[in-house]
Amino acid sequence: MTDVFNDAIDAVYSHGNIGAVTATYTPICGGETVSCSIIFENESGEQPDGFGAQSFEQIKTIEYRLTEITSEASRGDTFTVDSTVYIVDEVSYNDGYTVKVIVR
């Protein structure tokens, strides 16, 4: 039986207007590199300042499918897009289909 959620996610990542790009994932532990599709985003995140006002910082995130990379990325793992290397800082979420990581 096919998983409709995986089918929907595959459709999103293969749709040209969504912005999925090809990247190379390299685990810090020295495992195999993986060619994968990722969605790269710049998001705004709140930075509390203690006075009730909100300031924002830009947060770079990468979302990838667990069908391509079968585990959560670890701190220090890298994603390379063209010649730019993004280093994983932390996992933002994992819904069992995709993982979103915060990168620098």
Image (cartoon, rainbow, N blue to C red):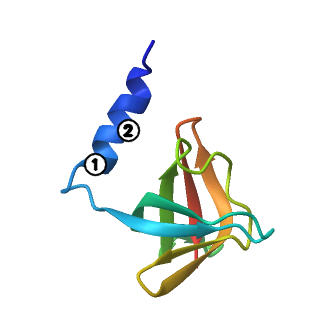
Q: Residue 20: x percent and y percent?
A: 33, 59
Q: For the N terminus, give its image quadrant.
A: top left
Side of 51 where 81 appears, left or right = left
Q: Hey, which residue is sitting farthest bottom in the picture? A: 83
Q: Is residue 49 above or below residue 68?
A: below
Residue 85 vs 66, above or below: the answer is: below
Q: Earlier in the sequence, mark 1 or mark 2?
A: 2
Report the residue that reaches farthest toward the right. 29
User: Residue 41: x, y in percent?
Assistant: 40, 66
Residue drawn 20% across the image and 56% down it: 16
Which label belongs to residue 86? none
- Mark 2, residue position: 9
Q: Residue furthest left?
A: 17
Q: Residue furthest top?
A: 1
- Dot 1 alpha-carbon crowd within 10 angstroms: few under 14, some 14 to 19, many 20 or more: some
| Residue marked by disc 1 | 14
Total marks placed = 2
Nearer to me, 19 or 54: 19
| Three-letter amino acid code at the position of disc 2 | Ile
Residue 82 is at least partly visible in this image: yes
- SS at badge 1: helix
Question: Label 1, label 2: how many angstroms apart (C-alpha)?
Answer: 9 Å
Quadrant (top left/top right/bottom left/bottom right) for the C terminus: bottom right
* 89 sits to left or right of 8: right
Q: What is the crowding at mark 2: few (fewer than 14 residues within 10 Å), some, or many (at least 20)?
A: some
Q: Position of residue 31 (x, y in %)?
A: 75, 64
* Quarter-of-image position of residue 100: bottom right
Q: Residue at x 66, y 72 (%)?
A: 50
